[in-house]
Image: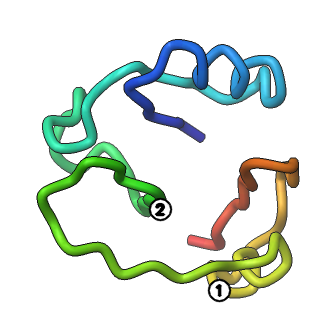
Amino acid sequence: MVGLDQSAAMLDIARGRVPWADFVRGDALNMPFAEGSFDRVFSSNFYGSRHMIYRRYFTAEGLAEELGGRILFAGRWFVMAAARV
């Protein structure tokens, strides 16, 4: 499980809440990962993007159901769910 954010402060919060995951500081429009690094990607809240954003809002249970997986962490500000591959 890997999280990406431009904010060092938000990454510190995420690391404190989900210490077993990897968190990387970077730009989502120029990601620091090799092509094909991930089987699935979930994105949310691109502030200041030049692209039109289609948003869907999920409960933790709804997100896990959408991914066909299970909830790994459900906090006040974010949810991590594992998808069945």
Q: Amino acid at mark 2?
A: Phe
Three-letter code, disc 1: Glu
**Residue depicted at x 36% and y 81%:** 54
Colour mapping used in the image: rainbow
Mark 2 and mark 1: Cα distance apart in space = 11 Å
In the picture of the structure, the residue carrying the numbered disc 2 is 42
Question: Which secondary structure lies at badge 2?
Answer: loop
| Residue depicted at x 72% and y 50% | 78
- Is 25 on the left-hand or right-hand side of 67? left
The answer to whether residue 58 is above or below residue 38 is below
Q: Pinpoint residue 38: horizontal percent, then vertical percent.
A: 37, 50
Residue at the disc numbered 1: 66
Q: Quadrant of the C terminus?
A: bottom right
Q: In the drawing, does residue 23 fall left or right of residue 29?
A: right
Crowding at mark 2 (Cα within 10 Å: few <14, some 14-19, many 20+): few
- Quick one: which residue is furthest to the front in this view? 48
Contact, mark 2 vs mark 1 (Cβ under 8 Å): no
Q: Residue at x 53, y 36 (%)?
A: 2
- Decide if residue 34 is on the left or right side of residue 37: left
Q: Quadrant of residue 15?
A: top right
Badge 1 element: helix
